[in-house]
Image (cartoon, helix red, strand yellow):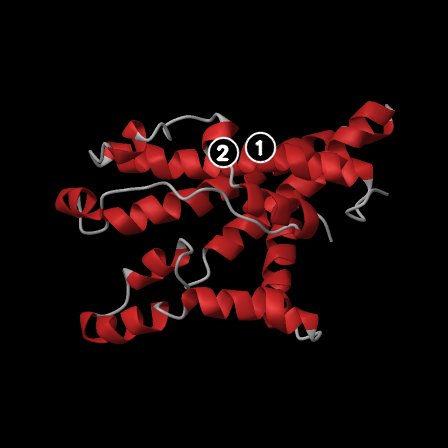
Amino acid sequence: MNRLGIEPTLLIFRIVTLLISFSFHEFSHAFVADKFSDPTPRQDGRLTLNPVRHLDIVGSIMLIVTGFGWAKPVRINPAIIERKSKAGLMIVSFSGPFSNLLLAITAGLLFRLMQTESLFQTSQTLYFFGSFLVQFIYINLSLMVFNLLPFAPLDGHEVFGFFVPQRFKPLWDRFQNYGMMILLLGFLILPYFRIHIFSSLLSPIIAGLFRLITGGN
């Protein structure tokens, strides 16, 4: 154990996952925005998989310590994107969580293959890699589900907001003003009092997706 109270192996897994998953998530936002002719991500140097361009110090520490965290948001120009497509903002927002799902599925396929061939039993190195895949899949699914929560500034507020009927848009926009407050309350304050609203709702979803992808029971 280290000062963070995390097993060294688990700490390594989370750091590697952070470097890959956050970079791919933010690159996906940048790539899709670029395809909608928005030059902002390219000008900001975000059209890259280089982790240095995407990682946020506080968000990275949170992921290592808690399993949840965030990267630096990709700046976009909504006006340019919406001129290309009314669904443009929704698609750009959804691309991030979707990238985490793709990473989880890819790792899940590799995990199933190794499990089918019983490769985990052949060497300590492959067993170590299999353990990494489990963490990698779980954290990417967690990032996907977390980011799809319908609260600003998460991706879900644009994704679900796209489907809100026009007559309810003003109410939806007012609700989003409290998004960060709701997230802080649900993930930081209430758990301090052993009230785990979000984890109680999200954990079964993440676990179900994990079983579906890995073929576990």
Q: Which mark is residue 192?
A: none
In percent of width and height, residue 193 lies at 69, 75
Task: Name which quarter of the figure residue 127 lies in.
Answer: top right
Q: Secondary structure at mark 2?
A: helix
| Residue type of the residue flagged with mark 1 | Leu
How would you rate the neighbour count of disc 1 (Cα within 10 Å): few for under 14, some for 14-19, many for 20 or more?
A: some
| Residue type of the residue flagged with mark 2 | Ser
How would you rate the neighbour count of disc 2 (Cα within 10 Å): few for under 14, some for 14-19, many for 20 or more?
A: many
User: What residue did someone put label 2 on?
Assistant: 23
Q: Is residue 112 visible?
A: no
| Residue in view at x 52 percent, y 56 percent | 146
Q: Disc count in the image?
A: 2
In percent of width and height, residue 73 lies at 40, 44
Q: Which mark is residue 19?
A: 1
Task: Name which quarter of the figure residue 125 lies in.
Answer: top right
In percent of width and height, residue 48 lies at 41, 26
Against 153, is 20 above or below? above
Would residue 13 be found to the left or right of residue 48 on screen?
right
In 3D space, how far apart are the residues under numbered discs 1 and 2 (Cα atoms)?
6 Å
| Residue in view at x 45 percent, y 64 percent | 180
In percent of width and height, residue 140 lies at 58, 44
| Residue in view at x 58 percent, y 51 percent | 142
| Residue in view at x 51 percent, y 43 percent | 101
